[in-house]
Amino acid sequence: MKFRIKKNDKVKVIAGNDNGKTGKVLKIYTKTSRVIIEGVNLRKRHTRPSQRNQQGGIIEKEMPIHISNVMLVDPKLNVPTRVGSQKVLDEKTKKKYVRISVKSGEMI
């Protein structure tokens, strides 16, 4: 499945417990249509001491959130926006689609 939100995009949560928070997309799960956003939807995980984590204890971890609950933040206006696409010709006259912000018309 093709999504309009990519890794490292700045997004804003528009629904759920973390409504209004913004963060950077860390990972996208295409099969389940979910994304992990930095500092959003944090859950506590109890871990046992292991070779990787010598201390153990309670760790706060970002959990996935459905992609329909997030909206891309316009880099120019710094407000949530819908994403459109536009056909652009390359140097070698190849057609290429780029993402554009609906609010400002800027390329993302």
Image (cartoon, rainbow, N blue to C red):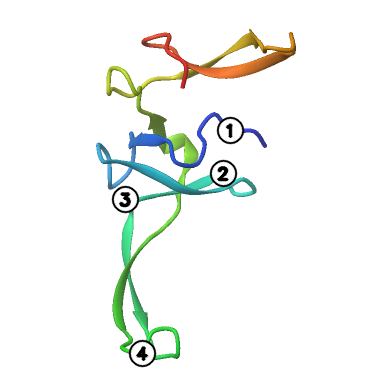
Question: Along the polypeptide, which appears first: circle 4 or circle 3?
Answer: 3
- What residue type is disc 1 on? Phe
- What residue type is disc 2 on? Ser
* Residue 33's disc number: 2
* Residue lying at 31% horizontally and 50% vertically, measured from the top left: 40
In the image, residue 54 lies at what x, y percent?
A: 36, 89
In the image, residue 53 lies at what x, y percent?
A: 39, 84
Report the mark closest to the observer, 1 or 4: 4
Would you call the spot at circle 1 few (<14 residues within 10 Å), some (14-19), or many (20 or more)?
few
* 3D distance between C-alphas at marks 3 and 1: 20 Å
Report the mark closest to the observer, 2 or 3: 3
Above or below for 87 versus 72: above
Q: Which residue is mark 4?
A: 54
- What residue type is disc 3 on? Val
For this rendering, which residue is in front, 72 or 86?
86
Classify residue 93 by image quadrant.
top right
In the image, residue 22 lies at what x, y percent?
A: 29, 39
In the image, residue 91 lies at what x, y percent?
A: 68, 12
Q: Which residue is mark 1?
A: 3
* Residue lying at 47% horizontally and 16% vertically, measured from the top left: 107
